[in-house]
Image: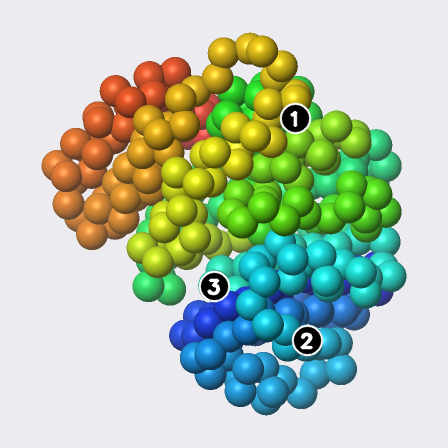
Amino acid sequence: MPCKKVTVLMAVYNGLPYLEEAVESVLRQSCADFWFYIVDDGSSNGTAEYLATLDDPRVKVWHRRNQGLASSLNFALEHVDTPYVMRADADDICLPERMETQLDFLEKQLDLVACSCDIEFTLDGGPTGLYSHLPRRDSEIRRTLMSGGHALCHPGLMIRSCVFKELGGYVVSGVGEDWALFVGLVSAGNVENIPAVLYRYRLRGGSLSVRYAVEIQKEKKKALAPWVGRRPFHFVFPTALADLLYRQSLVLKIKKRGCAAALFVLVAGSLSPVRAVKKVCREAKAKSR
C-alpha cells in the first residue's frame, strides 16, 4: 500500500556503531514511499560522516549544535507536511512491516490520535527472547500511565501530525520528554497499542534511560502532576532505582546469570511493590495470549 502519508523522525547524537543498522531498518520498510528526517544533534564521533554517505531521495539530514533530543525532534517536526509522524531511535530496529501495520491501523480507526506497539529487547544486536507486552486499550493505557507505569513505547509511536503539532511537539526539559508527550496524547484523544512486536529495543548501559533514570522519574512526576492532581504518587528515587534494576535484570537474564537477575527483581519489587504486582500481572496476561 502507498505510504506517502508518513514522515519518520530520528534525532541522533554520537550514534555509531548502531546508527547504520537503525537507519537501514527504516529504509527497508515494506512501504517504500515516505520521508525520513534525521537530525544530527552535534555529533563528534563520525556520525556526520556516515550520514553524508546516505544516497536516498527519501532522506533529509540536518546538522545542528547539540541541543538535546527534544529540541532536535521539534526542529524536524516543523518541516513535516505529511498526515502522520513515525518515531524511531538511532540505536533500535524497526521491523519491516512496522510502518505499514501502524498506518493501516490508524487509517481504519479515525478516533485514535496515535498508536504504539509491543517491543522485543535485544542485546549486542541479537534477539533475547524477552518482550514487553504493553496494555492494549485506551482505558488500560490511561490507568497504567496514571500510576506511573510503562504504557507506550516512545520510539514505537506513530502519531497524527496535526495532533503532534497542536501539542507543540516535545516539552524541552532535558530528559524524560516522552512523558509529557504521553500525557498530551491521551489528553488529545484515544491511544492504543497494536498487540504485535514491531520494534526492537536495544539494551545497553550507556543509554539515556539508564544514565538519567532519576532525572527521568522527576520529569515523569512533573508531567503527570496536572493529570493526577493531588493523588498519591510513587516517590521519585525508589521508583527510578526500581526501573533501573528491572532493566539490569533483563541484561543479567540474557547473560544467563539467573540468580543475580532474580536478586535484582526482588530488590526492585521491595522498592516499588505496587509496580511489582502489576508487572507480574502483565507478564501473566502476555503469556496467556
**Which secondary structure, mark 3?**
loop
In this rendering, the answer to whether 226 lies above or below 178 is above
The amino acid beneath tag 1 is Arg
Is label 2 or label 3 in front? Answer: 2
Residue 81 sits in quarter:
bottom right
Nearest to N terminus: mark 1 or mark 2: 2
Is residue 195 visible to the viewer in this orientation of the structure? no
Task: Locate residue 79: give its quadrant.
Answer: bottom right
Front-most of residues 121 and 195: 121
Q: Residue at x 23, y 44 (%)?
A: 253
- Mark 2 highlights which residue? 62
Q: Which residue is mark 3?
A: 91
Is the residue marked by circle 1 packed among few (<14), some (14-19), or many (20+) residues within 10 Å? some
Is residue 118 toward the left or the right of residue 255 in the image? right
- Residue 31, position as x, y percentages in the image: 73, 65
> What distance separates the C-alpha of mark 3 from that of mark 1?
28 Å
Q: Earlier in the sequence, mark 3 or mark 1?
A: 3
Q: Residue at x 85, y 59 (%)?
A: 82
| Foreground disc of the pair 1, 2 | 2
C-alpha span from label 1 to label 2: 37 Å
- In terms of secondary structure, where does tag 1 sit? loop
Q: Is 10 on the left or on the right of 216, as rendered? A: right
| Closer-to-camera residue (256/273) | 273
